[in-house]
Image: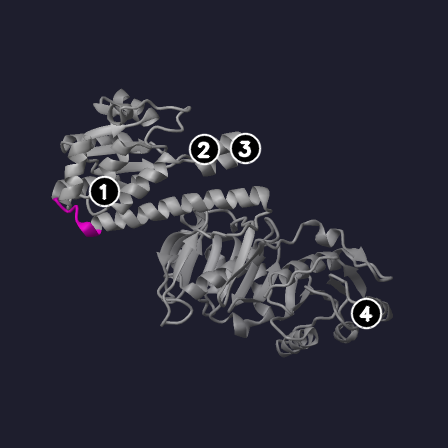
Amino acid sequence: MRALISVSDKTGVVDFAKGLVALGWEIISTGGTYKILKENGIDAVEIDEVTKFPECFEGRVKTLNPYIHGGILHRRDKESHLAQAKELGVEAIDLVCVNLYPFKATIERTDDFEEIIENIDIGGPAMVRSAAKNFASVLIVTDPGDYDAVLTALKEGSNTEDFRRDLMIKAFEHTAAYDSMIANYMNRRFNEGFGAKQFIVGAKVFDTRYGENPHQKGALYEFDNFFSQNFKTLKGEASFNNLTDISGAVKIASAFGEEKAVCIVKHGNPCGFAIRDNLIDAYTEALKCDPVSAFGGVVAVNGVVDEALAKKMNEIFLEVVIAGRITEEAQAVFASKKRIKLFEYDADRLLVSDDAYDFKHVSGGFVYQDADRVKENEVQNAELKSKREATKQEKKDLEIAWKVAALTKSNCVVYVKNGAMVAVGMGMTSRVDAARCALKKAEEMGLDVSGSAMASEAFFPFRDSIDAAAKAGVAAVIEPGGSIRDDEVIQAADEHDIALYFTGVRHFLH
């Protein structure tokens, strides 16, 4: 039995090769892999002894050879293939262990296009695909994490077709992801990221219990190991809906750097938010906005949940708590609640992935775009349109309201007072309805919105929203501007002595 080993990631390869040799396998190898095997006392055969042809063109061609691909691809169950292999002097290769040139590491390290081109693997994917195609007879190993399983299967006689088929699927995933990464990179470099084809590749982290509803299957996939490296489950099982709510809550709570912020989300929408000097006060203020909706909600804490905060949160039913970290003492407090789910990032605050692109499924395909971000200077650089200028506290409230509005379903209006959201209307077909709904809810909760700052993620088409804001006692408003009736909106603000700012940037979220 012969194994061909040629890997860029050398993790565990020496022990794997030693394990194969102990089982009586002959090892064929290339370049750096051959060198490291020989240095560790493994009697490997260099590739050109098999190909009968030297490595050439600075390593561009070394395994693209019929003695290699014939050895991998010929069918062992067909006499004609076996006879032709014998006639041509092609010996079988029964295991291929290959992982590919580090293209991702290269593009992260350099912008030198010549070096990037040279780190596009050709022979590796060809061998992987050949072995995967002939999985009925050949083991294809692309993941160092599978080395022990392969050795065990060979030792125990469990090298079944099902086992090889699983490796085959992983191999085609490996080459597909590799080619997709190259194509996406080239389109980013030369086509502003929007080429004729767009590839979205994620690695599976875990299955969810089901999708949005029990009759749907669901799973979490990740980019760049974000979840597997950072996201920790402390209690319970994350559902499909939990994960989408967590994403929304974390984006809002983490949008203010290291400030002690708490966001409460229900069905993808914020129903509470506050920033305070300590997290207990932040949670208490956030909860005041809409404690009815918060029941069974998701709470994102931009910091560490300690025992005292856990006791406060444990006063109502919360389905999910996600934080930078949740202490053991806090976990003990939550242990009495069977249905609560706890997750953390094992960090001092919440973490978010800096995804450059965003996409959404539509019937028959998906729409793809640059990711939307609120720049730090959007509020600071907003243009004052009214006669009255906002106070220092009002400007801080405007910043909070603006960021929350940008991350809330359109049409939305957000009211913030003294660092806490006091009203929110979201997902409405009319911006006026969003404002009215928010104010009605605040009234029901006994919250005073007078003196608050209001943000709208898109322009007000008419002055009526400003008139309604003035009636509620709003002191400052921030919006993108851009309506043909901006002059009427500005006039209304001046009539009501409201500070009005235009950012010039719209943040729709659909």
Q: Mark 1 near mark 2, Cβ–Cβ under 8 Å?
A: no
Spatial CA distance of label 2 from label 3 is 10 Å
Q: Which residues are magenta?
A: 157-162
**What is the crowding at mark 2: few (fewer than 14 residues within 10 Å), some, or many (at least 20)?**
some
Image side of residue 273 versus residue 365, left or right: right
- Which of 323 and 194 lies nearest the eye of the viewer? 194
Please tell me whether mark 3 or mark 4 is closer to you in this view: 3
**What is the crowding at mark 3: few (fewer than 14 residues within 10 Å), some, or many (at least 20)?**
few
Q: Secondary structure at mark 4?
A: loop
Q: Does the magenta portion include 42?
A: no
- Type of residue at label 3? Phe
- Type of residue at label 2? Asn
Say which residue label 3 marks.
113
Which tag, 2 or 4, sits closer to the chain's start? 2
In percent of width and height, residue 234 lies at 38, 55
Q: Tell me where residue 125 sits by quadrant.
A: top left
Q: Secondary structure at mark 1?
A: strand
Which label was assigned to residue 485?
4
In percent of width and height, residue 107 lies at 51, 36
- Which corner quadrant holds the N terminus? top left
Q: Secondary structure at mark 2?
A: loop
Which tag, 1 or 3, sits closer to the chain's start? 3
Say which residue label 1 marks.
139
Spatial CA distance of label 1 from label 2 is 25 Å
Is the magenta region chiefly helix, strand or loop? loop
Q: Tell me where residue 427 sits by quadrant.
A: bottom right
Spatial CA distance of label 3 from label 4 is 50 Å
Please tell me whether mark 2 or mark 4 is closer to you in this view: 2
Say which residue label 2 marks.
119
Which tag, 3 or 4, sits closer to the chain's start? 3
- Which of 402 and 73 lies nearest the eye of the viewer? 73
Which residue lies at the image location 39% right of the left edge and 47% below the top edge? 176
